[in-house]
Amino acid sequence: MRDDGFSLKTRGHSVEESTPDFSILRIHGAPQDMTERLSAAFKTQWPTAPNTISGGVCRLSPREWAIIGRSPDDIDQRIAPSCGAALFHLAHYRGGKSCWRIAGDGAPDLLSRGAQLDFHRSAFRAGAAAQTLFANVDALVAKPGDESAFDVYVDAPYKDYMRTWLTVASRLAADGA
């Protein structure tokens, strides 16, 4: 991920913006061993359960995954041999997505101001992901690790809007409003 310089720290949480490499893979007519081949090629457990993320790969739907934080060249070298004869479509969104890492004990409160999901650690556990409206913008929210950090991915044209929304919501959360 490339850091774009926007950061915010308040009592209870911090926000860091970046522009990740972000690709979408869609596979049709996949053979039974497809996920095993992809796991081996990417050296990570390829997620098969709905709304999960593992090793920078997020399952979006039964035949669709987001691959985050890997260069398009790296992905291209791994996908074609793994997919074999299966029909697949791979789209790279270089610079097309922005990510906000929201971390700290107050992160679930800030996130709940933007989306109607339960972000409490007992409900939105490590490895969870969800496509949702966040601050009225289509987003992918993921909790890739055990720490109290969440990643929110939105289309890059919403960057200024999200910066403003997160600044205002962070102030309100810090003030207890």
Image: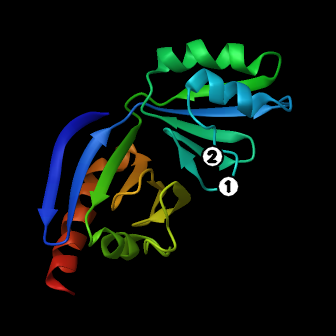
Residue 104: give its label: none
> Gap in Å between the C-alphas at discs 1 and 2?
6 Å
**x, y percentage for residue 39?**
64, 30
Q: Residue at x 54, y 20 (%)?
A: 75
Q: Residue at x 19, y 64 (%)?
A: 167
**x, y percentage for residue 5?**
15, 41
Residue 80 occupies quadrant: top right
Q: Amino acid at mark 2?
A: Arg
Residue 32 located left or right of residue 8: right
Residue closest to the far bottom? 177
Residue 50: give its label: 1
Q: Nearer the viewer, residue 136 or 107?
A: 107
**x, y percentage for residue 166?**
25, 63
Residue 45 occupies quadrant: top right
Residue 135 located left or right of residue 161: right
Q: Residue at x 21, y 70 (%)?
A: 170
| Dot 1 crowding, Cα within 10 Å, few <14, some 14–19, many 20+ | some
Q: Looking at the figure, which quarter contains the C terminus?
A: bottom left
Asked if residue 76 is positioned above or below residue 170 in the image, the reply reads above
Asked if residue 18 is positioned above or below residue 75 in the image, the reply reads below
Q: Residue at x 59, y 52 (%)?
A: 52
Mark 1 residue element: loop
Color style of the picture:
rainbow
Q: Amino acid at mark 1?
A: Pro
The mark tally for this picture is 2
Residue 59: give its label: 2
Q: Nearer the viewer, residue 158 or 47?
A: 47
Q: Are circles 1 and 2 on residues that touch, CB within 8 Å?
A: yes
Asked if residue 58 is positioned above or below residue 24 in the image, the reply reads below
**x, y percentage for residue 25?**
64, 32
